Image: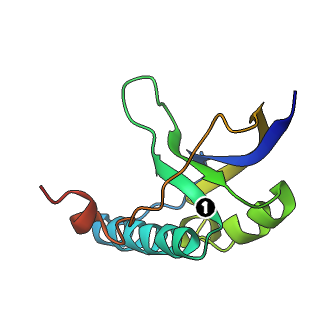
Amino acid sequence: MHFDQHTVILLTLDPDAPVMTDKETAALQDAHLAYTADMIEQGHVMAAGPAVGPDAGRMKGISVWSVDADAAGRLCAQDPAVRAGRLTPQILTWMVPSGQLLFRSVRAPRTTAEATEA
């Protein structure tokens, strides 16, 4: 059996995250969303989204990348929320039977306002 390898990045809230105002947090979240949308448009990220619910804890987001773990780590390090020390990435390689996952290209939101539109 053949396997496809995907890089998965789990983003967690850093326990030592800097204290920010609501306005600063909102601006950083918009910068994070815009960066993620850029990574999707450039073909580096195949899927990304927030982790939600009572069991999410410090887990804030999950993304599946089309590049190897080293490249994904370098690109993820440029995410404004990671650079600001708010989010910490955990990077792993995930193997699934070849052809099991299919990703379609869809437009990602670039701001919180866009993400929450009805």
Q: Position of residue 52 (x, y in %)?
A: 39, 35
Foreground residue among 44 and 114: 44
Q: Position of residue 67 (x, y in %)?
A: 76, 61
Q: Position of residue 47 (x, y in %)?
A: 53, 52
Left or right of 98? Residue 15 is left
Left or right of 28? Residue 12 is right
Foreground residue among 11 and 63: 63
Which residue lies at the image location 70% right of the left edge and 58% below the top edge? 66
Residue at the extreme top of the image, as rendered: 55
Which residue lies at the image location 81% right of the left edge and 66% below the top edge? 71
Left or right of 100? Residue 49 is left
Residue at the extreme left of the image, as rendered: 118
Foreground residue among 72 and 89: 72
Which residue lies at the image location 83% right of the left edge and 36% below the top edge? 3
The part of the image, by quadrant, that contains residue 101 is top right
The secondary element bearing badge 1 is classed as: strand
Quadrant for the N terminus in the image: top right
Instruction: Please tell me whether residue 1 is drawn above or below residue 33 in the rendered image.
Output: above
Amino acid type, label 1 = Val
Q: Position of residue 36 (x, y in %)?
A: 51, 67
How many labels, in total?
A: 1
Q: Which residue is mark 1?
A: 45
Quadrant for the C terminus in the image: bottom left
Asked which colour scheme the image uses, the reply is: rainbow
**Callout 1: few (<14), some (14-19), or many (20+) C-alpha neighbours within 10 Å?**
many
Which residue lies at the image location 76% right of the left edge and 37% below the top edge? 98
Foreground residue among 74 and 65: 65
